[in-house]
Image: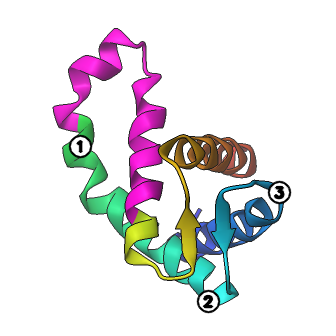
Amino acid sequence: MKWWQRVLLNTVIFLVLANFLNGFYVYEWQSAVLAAVILSLLNGFVKPIVTLFSLPFTLITLGLFYFVINGLMIWLTSYFVPGFVVHSFGQAILVSIILSLVNSLVTSE
């Protein structure tokens, strides 16, 4: 899947999740697009470093800590994008789990 297609998919997922989850809000579609772009940048540059340093925790939890890392990326995105609000870290983890599931379902061939 190309970069712009993933950004578009994440934008749609953010907009849909904002309608169903309490504590997760996207006030404008532009915020969703910007959040998807920022998230892809964070996943490209920050996430590999965080993943490397948290490797012992990821191994101990048999990979489940990876969801916490993804939640951290969503949480950081909410700080950088106005109109993209995540009220709790648990909500960020939930959004990241759903985002990962939908992305894996759509991109599996």
Q: Quadrant of residue 56?
A: top left
Query: Residue 50 shows which numbered tag?
Result: 1
Q: Residue at x 47, y 22 (%)?
A: 64
Please, what is the dominant secondary structure of the magenta stretch? helix
Residue type beneath disc 1 = Val
Q: Residue at x 52, y 49 (%)?
A: 88
Task: Name the element at disc 1.
Answer: helix
Tell me which label, 2 or 3, sits earlier in the chain: 3
Instruction: State which region is magenta.
Output: 52-76
Task: Name the element at disc 3.
Answer: helix
Q: Between marks 2 and 3, how big is the CA–CA gap? A: 19 Å
Query: Residue 30 shows which numbered tag?
Result: 2
Q: Looking at the picture, does residue 81 appear above or below residue 51?
A: below
Whether 67 is among the magenta residues is yes
Q: Between marks 3 and 1, how big is the CA–CA gap? A: 29 Å
Residue located beneath label 3 in the image: 20
Q: Residue at x 61, y 44 (%)?
A: 100
Residue type beneath disc 2 = Gln
